[in-house]
């Protein structure tokens, strides 16, 4: 299923909040990593398997074709009897945790917020927030 999503849909990096519903992702034929994770979660749940949403980062080695690097990435985990929770990244057709760095897990995308907080102060005092994540490989 991960390979079919990777080959049949166009990946689009989207910075807007929220996740498209699976029907919208199917209609558009494209989506972000969040959209692909939710689409596959819906599909495997319809087969009776437990699935949960994962948010984190993906390590992208130099000259790699991995999509979703340089920003927060999303994928899903499926509970497989005998194996436990297994990572599936439909954006890159990855099965297992190769290059996937888990930060938050939830039963849906709203419950898997990797970063959150509250600003106390005058609205004009806060203009923006930038987060930079750098993942390096241990040699």
Image (cartoon, rainbow, N blue to C red):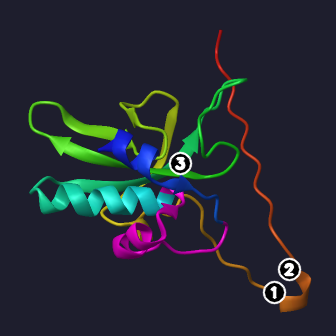
The reply to whether residue 122 is in sight is no
Of marks 3 and 1, which one's residue comes earlier in the chain? 3
Q: Is residue 82 toward the left or the right of residue 129 in the image?
A: left
Q: Position of residue 57 (x, y in %)?
A: 58, 43
Q: Which residue is mark 2?
A: 126
Classify residue 111 by image quadrant.
bottom left
> Which region is colored magenta?
15-33
Q: Position of residue 13 (x, y in %)?
A: 64, 58
Q: Which mark is residue 56?
A: 3
Viewer-side residue, 24 vs 103: 24
Of marks 2 and 1, which one's residue comes earlier in the chain? 1
Viewer-side residue, 97 vs 26: 26
Local SS, label 2: loop
On-image quarter of the N terminus: top left
Q: Which mark is residue 121?
A: 1
Please name which of the two marks, 3 or 1, marks the residue nearer to the observer: 3
Taking the spot 61% from the left edge, 52% from the top edge, the residue there is: 72
Q: Is residue 121 toward the left or the right of residue 100 in the image?
A: right
């Amino acid at each position: 299923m991960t390979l079919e999503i990777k080959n049949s849909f166009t990946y689009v990096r989207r910075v807007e909040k929220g996740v498209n519903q699976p029907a919208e992702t199917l209609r558009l034929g494209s989506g972000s990593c969040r959209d692909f994770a939710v689409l596959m979660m819906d599909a495997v749940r319809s087969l009776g398997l437990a699935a949960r949403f994962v948010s984190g980062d993906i390590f992208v080695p130099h000259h790699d074709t991995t999509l979703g690097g340089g920003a927060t990435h999303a994928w899903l985990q499926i509970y497989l009897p005998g194996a436990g929770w297994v990572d599936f990244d439909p954006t890159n057709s990855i099965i297992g945790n190769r290059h996937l760095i888990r930060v938050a897990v939830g039963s849906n995308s709203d419950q898997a917020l990797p970063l959150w907080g509250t600003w106390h102060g005058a609205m004009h005092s806060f203009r923006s927030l930038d987060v930079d994540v750098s993942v390096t490989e241990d040699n």
